[in-house]
Image: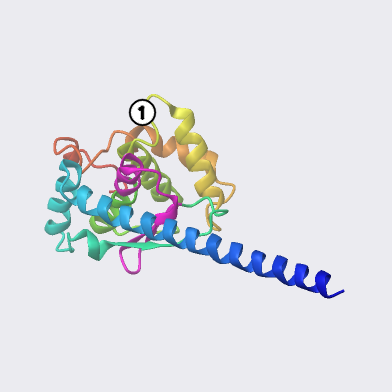
């Protein structure tokens, strides 16, 4: 009987030790992910792409320091979102544990910085489905998440986005075509020439 108890205690200790090691491994991995994300942010701040955004942010008297715009957080992996633009604070929240590499981070930044830029130049109305559709199209295009030639990519992404909005749910067909042709050509602030060709929304 004593031998059986000793065996069970040893097994329990082994399980506890394994769990501790697993948690330490996860913690170390998350710390590395966060460190990499911060390095990516510093790298992106020096990039030609961000230089164009930074110039416009200063014109609108908004901070151009990325560490004051971007905040990192740990996110639930079951949630499909990787980043969020928060209009009230004009900040971007990024899930550091979902960033694959620097190229992926660049894409995330250009997508959400487009939202911030549009908000600064026109103040986004989150109840205007045409404006939301246009903003989404611009973000997808400028970030490279969708290629201009791949209209189906835009259709899928915008439909998903509008369906998640209480105001725009079920109204995709009404707003997408109305926005697409004009908004996909508006690539401000990436192209200073195109910047003068504003859409009806911005």
Question: What is the secondary structure assignment of the residue under circle 1?
Answer: loop
- The quadrant in which residue 35 appears is bottom left
**What range of the chain is rendered magenta?**
82-110
Q: Report if residue 68 is visible in the image.
A: yes
The answer to whether residue 1 is above or below residue 49 is below
Which x, y percent locates residue 192? 14, 39
Q: Residue furthest right?
A: 1
Q: Which residue is mark 1?
A: 148
Mark 1 residue crowding within 10 angstroms, few (<14) / some (14–19) / many (20+):
some
Q: Nearer the viewer, residue 47 or 28?
A: 28
| Residue depicted at x 43% and y 37% | 178
Q: Nearer the viewer, residue 25 or 81?
A: 25
Q: Report if residue 117 is visible in the image.
A: no
| Residue depicted at x 81% and y 70% | 3
Which x, y percent locates residue 21? 53, 62
Whether residue 97 appears in magenta in the rendering, the answer is yes
- The quadrant in which residue 187 appears is top left
Whether residue 62 appears in magenta in the rendering, the answer is no
Which x, y percent locates residue 65? 18, 61
| Placement of the N terminus among the 4 image quadrants | bottom right
Color style of the picture: rainbow
Q: Nearer the viewer, residue 78 or 86?
A: 78
For the image shown, how many numbered marks are present on the structure? 1
Left/right placement of residue 114 relative to residue 157 reads left
Which x, y percent locates residue 175? 47, 42
């Amino acid at each position: 009987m004593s031998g059986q108890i000793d065996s069970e205690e040893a097994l329990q200790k082994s399980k506890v030790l394994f769990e501790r090691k697993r948690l330490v491994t996860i913690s170390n991995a998350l710390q590395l992910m966060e460190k990499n994300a911060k390095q990516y942010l510093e790298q992106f701040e020096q990039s030609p792409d961000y230089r164009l955004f930074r110039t416009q942010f200063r014109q609108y008297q908004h901070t151009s320091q990325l560490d004051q715009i971007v905040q990192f957080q740990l996110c639930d992996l079951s949630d499909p979102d990787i980043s969020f633009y928060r209009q009230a604070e004009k900040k971007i929240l990024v899930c550091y544990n979902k960033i694959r590499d620097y190229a992926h981070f660049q894409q995330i930044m250009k997508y959400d910085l487009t939202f911030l830029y549009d908000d600064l130049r026109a103040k986004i109305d989150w109840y205007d489905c045409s404006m939301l559709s246009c903003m989404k199209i611009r973000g997808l295009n400028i970030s490279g998440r969708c290629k201009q030639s791949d209209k189906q990519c835009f259709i899928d992404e915008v439909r998903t986005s509008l369906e998640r909005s209480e105001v725009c749910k079920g109204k995709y067909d009404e707003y997408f075509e109305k926005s697409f042709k004009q908004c996909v050509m508006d690539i401000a602030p990436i192209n200073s020439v195109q910047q003068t060709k504003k859409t009806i929304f911005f």
